[in-house]
Image (cartoon, grey):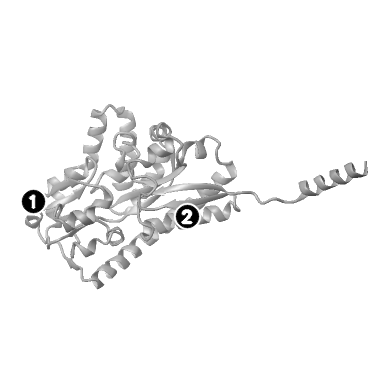
């Protein structure tokens, strides 16, 4: 009996020891390099989430497509292989046509902040939410893609200089814009751009200054044009639908996610312009020549109504007109 009592007491002591709770580790597949402003902003966001969850959740990043290419991340999340990822909706024109409007349609937004606001507001649109559910994801925060310019092997100063220049492109709508101003679009992935310019497969690419710096484009394209081709929202930080919408995350943690996301969205708007200025100064120190573009007004006239083209394309693809028009209304309310 004495031995039994001792054993019972020992069990009681062990049961009373506070054992550390293991963090819920969430692997995040990310499409951009760790050094980019986009990646650093997502890292800061995730670190604050981990801190405010008091160790309940931890995010581990896999950069530069090492855990999934841009066009693989959404299926990986939907299939349960990973639970979070950062990728661009433009890689999924058929699967995410409505939510992708802010990332796929060029020459539409005056600045990245407007595009980010529209992207965030679209999360409340019923047709867009249904689109997220079908794909097994929900966006928790979006990035900025400040005004796109051209980075080229040679100087482009006028509309005539653009004619016949091969430019990196993707999706369905960017090629239309480039063709309207006389350029030749060549679809290729992000990680192919450097070599594409180096080998002469393309003459130019179209980025904001910071993203161009992240991919070392200045090493192969020493002439940057200040032509303005519109801003967009950028890569989106997607959580799995099950985590955010279907009970995987507690209500208290989802409240933390929403609170921190709202804060960081505003920070990203504020920091976008600063990052662009710093990146331009950096590449100019490396020998890049900034070339003033002379024919911006002509370019603006030549580019078609991209929002109207987008809406027509979606309706022809079978997306209900009511859903398409509801998205158009949100965009126009922010851009008119």
Q: Earlier in the sequence, mark 1 or mark 2?
A: 2
Residue at position x 31%, y 45% from top?
Answer: 103
User: Residue 283's x, y, as percent?
Assistant: 26, 68
Q: Which quadrant holds the N terminus?
A: top right
User: Residue 65's x, y, as percent?
Assistant: 35, 49
Between 203 and 130, the one lying in front of the other is 203
Q: Alpha carbon of mark 1 to alpha carbon of mark 2: how far?
A: 42 Å
Q: Secondary structure at mark 1?
A: loop
Residue at position x 42%, y 57% from top?
Answer: 41
Q: Residue furthest left?
A: 160
Above or below, 60 against 317 in this view is below
Crowding at mark 2 (Cα within 10 Å: few <14, some 14-19, many 20+):
some
Q: Secondary structure at mark 2?
A: helix
Q: Residue furthest bottom?
A: 285
Which residue bears the numbered disc 1? 164
- Taking 272 as reference, is 247 left or right? right
Between 107 and 322, the one lying in front of the other is 107
Q: Residue furthest right?
A: 1
Crowding at mark 1 (Cα within 10 Å: few <14, some 14-19, many 20+):
some
Q: How many marks?
A: 2
Residue 45 marker: 2
User: Residue 151's x, y, as percent?
Assistant: 20, 59
- Taking 40 as reference, is 55 left or right? right
Is disc 1 in contact with disc 2, using a CB cutoff of under 8 Å?
no
Above or below, 224 against 255 in this view is below
Between 174 and 125, the one lying in front of the other is 174
Q: In the rendered image, is residue 124 in sight?
A: no
Q: Residue furthest front?
A: 3
Residue at position x 54%, y 44% from top?
Answer: 254
Between 142 and 71, the one lying in front of the other is 71
User: Residue 183's x, y, as percent?
Assistant: 12, 50
Q: Quadrant of residue 102?
A: top left
């Amino acid at each position: 009996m004495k031995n039994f009592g001792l054993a019972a007491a020992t069990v009681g002591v062990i049961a009373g020891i506070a054992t550390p709770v293991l963090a819920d580790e969430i692997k995040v597949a990310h499409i951009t390099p760790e050094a980019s402003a986009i990646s650093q902003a997502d890292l800061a966001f995730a670190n604050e989430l981990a801190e405010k969850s008091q160790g309940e959740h931890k995010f581990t990043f896999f950069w530069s497509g090492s855990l999934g290419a841009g066009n693989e991340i959404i299926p990986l999340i939907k299939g349960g292989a990973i639970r979070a990822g950062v990728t661009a909706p433009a890689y999924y024109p058929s699967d995410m046509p409505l939510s992708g409007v802010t990332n796929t349609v060029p020459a539409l937004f005056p600045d990245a902040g407007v595009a980010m606001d529209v992207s965030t507001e679209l999360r409340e649109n019923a047709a867009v939410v249904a689109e997220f559910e079908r794909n097994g994801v929900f966006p928790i925060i979006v990035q900025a893609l400040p005004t796109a310019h051209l980075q080229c092997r040679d100087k482009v100063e006028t509309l005539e200089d653009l004619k016949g220049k091969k430019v990196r492109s993707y999706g369905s709508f960017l090629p239309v814009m480039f063709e309207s101003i006389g350029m030749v679009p060549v679809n290729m992935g992000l990680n192919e751009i450097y070599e594409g310019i180096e080998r002469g497969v393309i003459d130019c690419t179209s980025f904001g200054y910071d993203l161009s710096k992240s991919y070392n484009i200045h090493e192969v394209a020493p002439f940057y044009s200040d032509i303005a081709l519109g801003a967009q929202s950028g890569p989106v930080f997607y959580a799995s639908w099950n985590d955010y919408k279907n009970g995987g995350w507690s209500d208290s943690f989802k409240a933390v996610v929403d609170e921190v996301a709202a804060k960081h969205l505003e920070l990203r708007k504020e920091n976008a312009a600063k990052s662009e200025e710093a990146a331009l100064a950096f590449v100019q120190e490396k020998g890049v020549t900034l070339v003033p573009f002379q024919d911006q007004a002509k370019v603006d006239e030549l580019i078609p109504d991209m929002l109207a083209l987008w809406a027509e394309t979606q309706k022809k693809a079978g997306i209900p007109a009511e859903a398409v028009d509801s998205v158009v209304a949100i965009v126009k309310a922010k851009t008119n």
